[in-house]
Amino acid sequence: MIVQRQLLKFLAQAPNSCIPNKSWGTIGVRCLQTKENPTSSSLDRSTVKTFTLSDQTKSEVKHHASLANYWWDPLGPIKALHALNKLRIPFICEGLKSQHKISSELINTTQMLKNQNILEIGCGGGILTESLARIGSSVTALDLSEDLIALARHHLSLEQNQELVDRIQYKIEPIEHHASYRKNYYDAVVISEVLEHVDENDKIEFLRASVETLKPGGSMFITTLNKTISMWVVGVLIGEYILRAIPIGTHHYGKMISPEYVRHILNTLNCDTVLVKGSSYNFLRNYWSWTNTTSLFYALHAVKK
């Protein structure tokens, strides 16, 4: 009990102390004013757009952009995202298969997601984006960071397969803006390792806009961190501050969210949650696996009615 009280005391103080206050939260109207902003760089920024962001959102974007030089290093600071593809790609494929959205002739082929139109929100430098496109899907990928979108575009430009290149479109754009002109449009929406960065007060509007872009019968796939003391101890205290396996300041306890709350929000948005699976991450082995508990990480699949 003494340890638990100490942890709770630390959590209460954390937002103003050692864990930066970050947010992928709703930026709505304040992000609708855009301008072309060509800049000179080793990365191609000729089509990058910038948005007027709040100071809080700028801090979040800056944190992730600071990792740009290491984004595609499978053994670097965000190696966990590379390793996570071994779980999240099959999770998405099996989810669409269970909803009979994949043609029988494509099942278990290298083009299993052919003809699937997917939106990825918070794509970063494109680790998941390229993997989804490699198995046939067309992917529109959103992020708020000019640096990471420039990196994603640069990495894609090195690809020799032009068909793959043509299946990916990167945009610097908040989901709230994207949803204003892409309603009922996508077969699937993927929000992977992003929801835990959305400000607690903004999660409902963030998910509302995400759902708006889905076709009726479309699937939403979410992977994120549960809001538990166990997750804070494992993911933040140990993962960030002791093992340094994750960059310090990446996660904030107050922005983590339980699968029950996600399910509740999606239910109010006319989506049925059809599957929730727990997962765990071995920091030393850089290995993800499915588990019987959602107390740490989890993956959720919901379908729009």
Image (cartoon, rainbow, N blue to C red):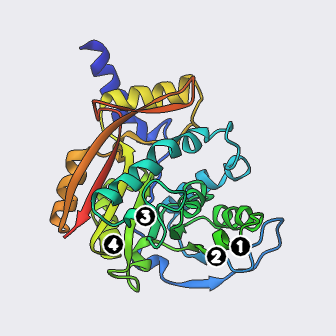
Q: Amino acid at mark 2?
A: Asp
Q: Nearer the viewer, mark 2 or mark 4?
A: 2
Mark linked to residue 209? 4
Say what secondary structure mark 1 lies in: helix
| Snapshot quadrant of residue 266 | bottom left
The CA span between labels 3 and 4 is: 33 Å
| Contact flag, marks 2 and 1 (Cβ < 8 Å) | yes
User: Quick one: label 3, few (<14), some, or many (20+) residues within 10 Å?
Assistant: few
The CA span between labels 2 and 1 is: 6 Å
Please give the residue where the numbered disc 1 appears in the rendered image.
Answer: 162
* Residue 129 position in % (x across, y down): 56, 61
Say what secondary structure mark 3 lies in: helix
* Residue 142 position in % (x across, y down): 52, 68
Q: Is 127 in front, or is 226?
A: 127
Q: How many marks?
A: 4
| Snapshot quadrant of residue 179 | bottom left
Q: Is residue 75 left or right of residue 189?
A: right
Q: Earlier in the sequence, mark 2 or mark 4?
A: 2
Mark linked to residue 105? 3
Q: Where is 238 relative to 185, above or below?
A: above
Q: Where is 300 relative to 247, above or below?
A: below
Q: Earlier in the sequence, mark 3 or mark 4?
A: 3
Q: Nearer the viewer, mark 1 or mark 3?
A: 3
Q: Amino acid at mark 3?
A: Glu
Please give the residue where the numbered disc 2 appears in the rendered image.
Answer: 166
In the rendered image, the quadrant that contains the N terminus is top left
Q: Nearer the viewer, mark 3 or mark 2?
A: 3
- Residue at the spot 76% in from the left edge and 66% down from the top edge: 160
